[in-house]
Amino acid sequence: MRVAIIGAGFGGLCMAIRLEQAGIRDYTIFEKSGGVGGTWHDNTYPGAGCDVPSHLYSFSFARYSDWSRRYPAQPEILAYLDHCADRYGLRPHLRLNTEVTALTYEDGAWRVDTAANPDGEIFDVVVAAVGQLNRPQIPEISGDFAGRSFHSARWEDHDLTGRRVAVIGNGSSAAQLIPKVAERAAHVDVYLRTPNWVVPKPDAEFGPLLKAAFRFVPPLQWAYRAWLFQYSERAVFPALAGGWSTRLLRQRALGHLHAQIRDPDLRAVLTPDYPVGCKRIVLDNHFYPALARPDVSVITTPIAGLTEAGVRTEDGRERPADTIVYATGFQATEFLMPMRVTGRDGDDLQQTWKEGAEAYLGIAVPRFPNLFLLYGPNTNVGHSSIVFMLECQTRYIMGCLGLIEEHGPMEVRPEAMDRWRRALAEAMDRTVWQAGCASWYKTASGRVTNNWPRPMSVYRRVTRRPNPEAYRFTPAG
């Protein structure tokens, strides 16, 4: 069995490791960038880091005792993934700087085309691990700016010392980079469309004694990880589903805002008018103080366009800028784009998903046999670690590989997809994501295509093993 893995981030590496552990070594990892890491390879902006605790944001089978702090920064996460690639011998299977352009199902197998090889290679199974946060979203703004401009996920080695910087966006990436940029720039203009709920980040360095304890007393690390998991499931998730902690989370966010922003006018600007959790919650301790600096301006007037010298807002005012940073997120709802994916009988995946991406368990799509998704539709979590979800998915796919060997190519049945769609919609209706705010969780029409609406423990249960009755099998060849 030949397996193609697309993407070398957490998902792709996890899949490759599971194949190695099962003795399946005829696989190739296609990665469009020059190294492993996925989003952590791409996002190198100042202050880049994770809002999930280190010991939970790592593989359960590759626990890492040398984390330097509770919440990891980008360089440390990337080092961890490089460590995993080396530890499990994945590098001989890596094909870096190789972008997959098309997947085509023909005669019971998949042809994988790349930019360098448009004629393609044949694989029995394809696992798409491209993630949800890999294609930067840059807003369409009229006008030509003469200075430097770039997206936060494509950070350029550009000295900002003494410059006037315009930052467009105020999500998690903006919250992390604005304090760092403000330390060097002469002035920062932050163009804010909708404020985010921000809660304090309980970050701290691990001292030498605690690091030694994690290393030499493994049960301590396991217990700490288990506590982090249970806290996220029992205290944080209920706030996203109208549970007992909703009011407490809102009070915590408002308390953080009042403690760090003294100016009542600025505080009013930064107070969201939608329920906490409807958009991704920002965990940060330095964002608000940066916005309150005298050399930082928060601008809520909509942008009308760009000029050669800066940014013009709808009130007619032009603010000069040397550099524009787009901290505007990703095209998260456009799964697998821009690849062309053609399934059985010539079905086009993007046409299938024209009303919004969906997949059975977030993993399989009817009429696309032997194609499996990691971090697919409705598998993102807003309260904990996506790594846990990826491990559930890779375990499930490994079970599918056994069924394929026994019965031939497998394809999820439409009736199983219908049942899944109904159950998902029922659970989604109870979440705060349906409250009406715009977010990267949902399409322009308002359909939530990205998030998982139940606790992660439920997802672990429903993906424990594949149910053969949910699939149809075609004899090989």
Image (cartoon, grey):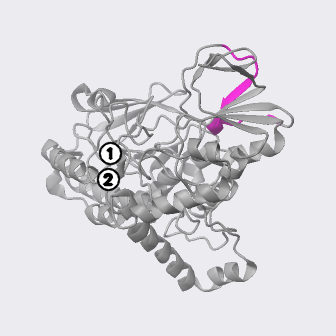
Q: Element at badge 1?
A: helix
Q: Is residue 183 above or below residue 50?
A: above
User: Does residue 275 show up magenta in the picture?
Assistant: no
Residue 75 placement (x, y as % from top left): 69, 54
Residue 330 placement (x, y as % from top left): 51, 36
Q: Are marks 1 and 2 in contact (CB under 8 Å)?
A: yes
Q: Element at badge 2?
A: loop
Q: Nearer the viewer, residue 211 or 316?
A: 316
Q: Which mark is residue 431?
A: 2
User: Does residue 158 show up magenta in the picture?
Assistant: yes
Residue 79 placement (x, y as % from top left): 67, 58
Q: Is residue 294 above or below residue 87?
A: above
Quadrant of the frame with the C terminus:
top left
What is the magenta range? Answer: 144-160
Q: Which mark is residue 434?
A: 1
Distance from label 1 to label 2 (Cα)? 6 Å
- Marks counted in the figure total 2
Disc 2 marks a residue whose amino acid type is Thr
Q: Is residue 312 above or below residue 340?
A: above
Q: Nearer the viewer, residue 113 or 308?
A: 308
Disc 1 marks a residue whose amino acid type is Gln
